[in-house]
Amino acid sequence: MAYVVGLDEVDATQVELVGGKGASLGELTRIASIAVPAGFCVTTDAFRASGGKVVAEDVAAAIVGRLDERTAYAVRSSATAEDSATASFAGQHDSYLNVVGAQAVLERVQQCWGSLFTERAVSYRSRSGIDERDVAMAVVVQEMVDPHASGVLFTADPLSGNRTVASVEAVLGLGEALVSGLVNPDVYSVRDGAVSGDGTALTSAQVLRLVELGRTIEAHFGRPQDIEWCLAGDAFAIVQSRPITTLFPIPAVAADGEPHVFVSVGHQQMMTDPIKPLGLSVWQLTAGPPMHEAAGRLFVDVAPRLASPASRAAVVEMIRKGDPLIGDALDTVVERAFVPTVPDPEPAAGPASFTAPASIETDPAFVTELVARSEAAIMALERDIQTHSGPELFAFLRENLQDLKAELFAPLNGQVIMAAMEATWWLNDQLEAWLGEKNAADTLTLSVPGNVTAEMGLALLDVADVIRPYPEVVAFLEDVSGDDFLDALATLDGGPAARDAIQAFLAKNGMRCIGEIDLTRPRWAEHPSALLPAILGHVKHFEPGEAERHFEHGRQAAAAKEREVLERLRALPDGEAKAAETKRMIDRVRTYTGYREYPKYAIVNRSFAYKRALLAEAARLVDAGVLHAVEDCFWLRFEELESAAITHRADHALIAERRRAFATYEALTPPRVLTSEGEAISGSYGREDVPPGALVGLPVSTGTIEGRARVILDIADAEFEPGDILVTAYTDPGWSPVFIAIKGLVTEVGGLMTHGAVIAREYGLPAVVGVEHATQRIRDGQRIRVHGTDGYVELL
């Protein structure tokens, strides 16, 4: 067993022996231009041999043999989990400076070991998903440097993420005062060889030399670094380098050196969580414009559209209508001229999703045709997919995915969706101009026909109506802890009827769930207990027949609003013409708005069929010894799983690495807009017409409501009392079952035509979306007032 090893004897591969800090320092000694103070590591073998507490005699002898009694040392913890690509552990473990004498060094080594078990370190590991059984502590012992100045260098801007900007913090003397927050450092920023900022600690020439060393280290490790340094005389010494773990990764396509502007797909799909590789790759196969991956999220590069004068304004304006924050961020990109202007191609080309389809007239037959065509395709898929397995299955799926893509991008599909959106915009703009009426379309679109997502929420009320008369069933469901409860219901009074009602709901909606664009997520058909809080809440808080009453109330409110608006318009100059055009737009919006939710429903229907077939294939690969577990298939891309089915080989190391990486992705917040330089650009609403302290967002459903905020991130925790307001990160269609139980909605993500906004209007819920960090800024249980007409939230 090696109790002590020199820093020059280890490298980045030996984390298990010398911990993250020791391995990084050892690797730094291998870079010719980098100076690292001499030293050694007390290994994890020594830690284990001493029981992690008292320094064993032979361990002490090995340490003392490396020491000079007259030399001052830095003694620093180096846990096996720290300074990794996923967790820095900055400040979590102990470090000691100017330690002189063998006995003092041994005491500090023992204290470093003990810091592995402090409450703060244990809590940090728990938050980072690190298994306690996998952690051990090494200790780095290095000769002290007597520096003129010390500090930290970030080779990327830690705030914006820009990889072309380096940031330096410096203090005179030792850096301990900086790390402990006792002094304000001099701060320098470097971009394109130019230094901004000034101070007494470093000259501009020294800052540039330090950044050059940092770039060398960054290139060696292959990612931006957080570097601790000392300046002694005219020489820089590096005493630590670790990855900057808070930066959002840049899509790989940016390595071509060209300017790219990536817009988040998740913000438009109302699902900003990371997606597993199989889910990502299947979604990419159906996408129109190419979608680029970073940290388990997808992005579309709009740089080609911004480069074209003919399309630039149109694409920014179209995106702004959906999400003003993205639109404002793109304005910033355009103002900076980040993307050079190029001549317009002839004819102008671009991704299909940014090309406005030709207009159509108002005709319900168009919706009927689209739905019938899609339902026939789904029935054919569910019938035919069962006849395929092995490599044949993947060929079948590729063809079916292309059929789905053709369906999604069929001209009529886009025309119907755009007709609803344009009619909504027209009504809101014109009725505000003519009548001073804000967001009039919100009321005019209450209870529109054919909205499958809204119908799903109402259908759960009908399930509650079946269950409510049977106290024994209610009591049973309140104690359910797993997903195998449906068969057990049959033994209870009223149980068969309750089971049949739940199963009927799942037969139509069981393919849905929170985050449903990720094919790998458990569906309600697989995880039915996720619906029980919503069902039981409906049982408790509603009377029988609420679904029909709710829909009829909305329909009558919309009709009354239509009569009122038309009557007021007729009293205006040229009123008959205004009223006639408005009536045409109302008919248009009520004919087509319901269909807005259908394409997503069709996608998720097909996805569930794909998932069941792929899981069956994965089970065959488990039986053949190719995969260790069925769920391993989620960590392979579609083409990799296809290769495993053909070759009967799978890369288990890759699967394990992707599992570890995914845990780090969950801690990252995806930006709305990300440049190829790594800069996350935040948009702004630019509003000053809100009360002090109010949280600004986008108004998507009119009205004002005051109530208790329920900050909830998982539908399985969705227990509401009458008058509650849901505050959450995002609401995709899987949240719809709880919308009927709330009185208002606040989300961090969303736009005027995203799913949560559409359903909020359908149900008449005042809603404000796109409220940055709402789930952190609003406390669960706090009283708030949601201004759905004007787009802000007051904390009461």
Image: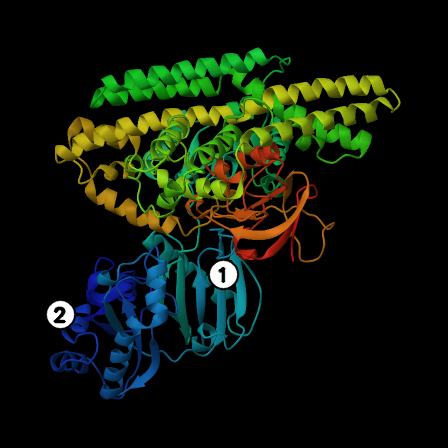
Residue visible at 17% across and 32% down? 621
Q: How far apart are marks 2 and 1 (CA)?
A: 38 Å
Image coordinates of residue 471 in percent, x first then y, are 41, 42
Residue 700 appears anywhere in the view = yes
Q: Residue 2 carries which label?
A: 2
Left or right for 753, reference 179: right
Tell me the residue that label 1 is attached to: 167
Q: In this view, does 153 lie to the left or right of 435?
A: left
Residue at 27% of width from left, 76% of height from top? 114
| Residue 473 drawn above or below residue 596 | below
Tag 1 or tag 2, which sits nearer the N-term? 2
Work out whether 655 lies above or below 132. Answer: above
Q: Which amino acid does label 1 sit on?
A: Ser
Residue 403's spot in the image, x, y percent? 39, 17
Q: Which of marks 2 and 1 is in front?
A: 2
Number of other residues with Cα within 10 Å of mark 2, as a class: few under 14, some 14 to 19, many 20 or more: few
Q: Nearer the viewer, residue 631 or 355?
A: 631
